[in-house]
Every structure is written in structure tokens, then in C-alpha cells.
Amino acid sequence: MSSVRTLPYWTDVRRRRPSRHDWFTPEQPGASVLAAHVARSAHGGWWADDPEAARALLVHCGPERLLYGDPVWLGPDVLAHYGRGQFHTPDSFLPLLGRTFTHITPWVRVLYVHAERPRPVSMHTSAWVRPLHATDEAHLDRFARRASASAQRAGSPHWIAETWGGHRALAASGFAWGAFLGPYLASLACGYLVGRNHLDIAVATDPAFRRLDLALACVHAATTVAHAHGFTPTWSAPRTNHASRALAEAAGFQPVRQEVVYWAGPALPC
């Protein structure tokens, strides 16, 4: 029998943060931004063993999961409900992940912070970029349908919208910029996670419109607006994703550290 203590309840505290919200103060670049993004986007939630004096905390939004505290206060029966996903967690939670999920895949990602002048793009290319609005939901729907079948499930939201709860919420968020060629949304950069002080940028491009500097133009727009509103733009990419890392460096991002995250799931049978 597991030595992990399973509590008789697990409280949803998405509307009222746990008493130990200072776990994420001051906000640091990286996964801790997820906590403030949940409050901003009203998507996902905070889960704690005790909202008055939290000892273990899970923050979830889209595929992202953030674990903090002492794993003794969290049992596999609770954690399984929120897998499959990408876990940002101290090593102390790894035995718990192993007892909960059939597969755990570690991967190293590189975290970047915007710090340099980006490579310029032509004025003609930049002119194709504009902010997305709520009326652009249909453009995002089409963008998702055109995504590679190997990377996108038919009928599901594009991965870039998952931390906002779908295409409508992302389009209306005020944190997305797209390059439009005629009726097509060809490339998109957005605040994948938007915290109090940091804006973590994600980018996606329709395969038919790659190598046109559209992604770089969208990132230029995202970083310019982020700085104007007092955010520090950040970027994260798997260490083996050389295309994403090259785009980050072209856009003026500098690597600051590497971290290990864990893709886990599905849950083991009860």
C-alpha cells in the first residue's frame, strides 16, 4: 500500500487562491507564470489539499500542470484526474508521478528571455500582421483544420489555444497577433501564458506559408506590445527543436537556463 496520504477531499480554489500564494511571488520566468495566467484567463484552476493552509498545490491549464509543496499530501487517485499532461515539478514529486501514470517522458527545454534587437523583417511582411479580435474565431478554426494531421486531432482546438480554453477565448484575449494572406491566417504568435510580469510567447505557422518570415513578423508584434505594457517576453523550446530555437534567437531572445519537464499519461488503472 502506498505511503502517500490521500485526503478525503480536494478543493477547487480557482476563484480563491490558496493561502500560500506567495509560492509564486516574485514571479519568475517559466512555469510559475501559469499561476497568474489561470487567474487572468479564467481557464484551468488551482487545486490544494487545504485552501486555508495549502501544503500541496496543483495548478492546471490546458495541457500544463504545475506541482508545488509536499507530495505526501497528494495521492495518485487525485493526480490521475488531471493527467495526461506536461508536468513542471520538483524531483520530489517524481515517485508520485511514477505511481500514477503508465508513461513518463522527460524532456529538456530551453528558456529564453527577450533581450536583444531582433533580425528585421520587411515592411511589406510586417504589414500583413495585425492583432486578433473576437471576430477572428473562424480564422482560427480554419487554421486548426489546416494544421498537420500528425500534430492536430480533427475537430480539436489548435494546441496554441489550449491555455485559453479554445479559439474564441484566444481570439478575444488581446494577446494574439496573426499574419493574414488574403482570407488565410497564415501564422500566429500569442501569449501562451500571460502572468503579472511575464508573457510567454508561442508561435504556429500554416505549413503552406513557412519560410516567408511571417512567424518572425508576428513575434515582433507580440514582443513590441508586451514591452509597451510592461511585460518581459519569454520563450521556451525543447532543446532538440532547432527550428523554434533559431526563431527565438532571430527574434532577439537569449537563453537563460534549461529545465526538465515531464509528459505523463495515461493514468494507471485503479
Image (cartoon, rainbow, N blue to C red):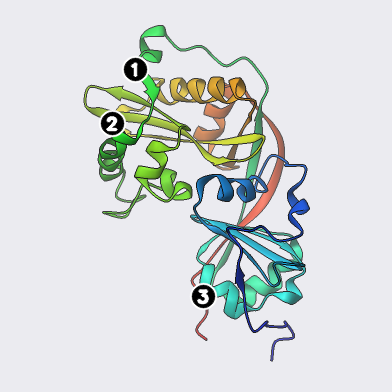
What residue sits right under mark 1 in the picture?
128
Q: In percent of the image, x 50 and y 33: which residue is there?
A: 243
Crowding around mark 1 (Cα neighbors within 10 Å: few <14, some 14 to 19, many 20+) is some
What residue sits right under mark 3 in the picture?
267
Q: Nearer the viewer, residue 247 or 233?
A: 233
Give the Cα distance between marks 2 and 3.
37 Å
Q: Are marks 1 and 3 in contact (CB under 8 Å)?
A: no
What residue sits right under mark 2 in the picture?
208
Q: Nearer the viewer, residue 124 or 195?
A: 195
Residue 41: percent from the left, percent from the top?
51, 46
- Specify the quadrant of the image occupied by residue 100: bottom right
Q: Nearer the viewer, residue 46 or 154?
A: 46
Mark sitting earlier along the chain (1/2): 1
Residue 169: percent from the left, percent from the top?
40, 44
What's the residue type where badge 1 is placed? Trp
* In the image, farthest residue toward the bottom: 1
What's the residue type where badge 2 is placed? Ala
Q: Nearer the viewer, mark 2 or mark 3?
A: 3
| 185 left or right of 198 in image | left
| 221 left or right of 259 in image | left
What's the residue type where badge 3 is placed? Ala
Residue 238: percent from the left, percent from the top?
57, 44
- Specify the quadrant of the image occupied by residue 72: bottom right
Q: Secondary structure at mark 3?
A: loop
Q: Nearer the viewer, mark 1 or mark 3?
A: 1
Is 135 rendered above or below residue 81? above
Q: In percent of the image, x 55 and y 44: which residue is there?
A: 40
Crowding around mark 3 (Cα neighbors within 10 Å: few <14, some 14 to 19, many 20+) is many
Mark sitting earlier along the chain (1/3): 1
- Specify the quadrant of the image occupied by residue 128: top left
Q: In percent of the image, x 51 and y 20: which residue is there?
A: 220
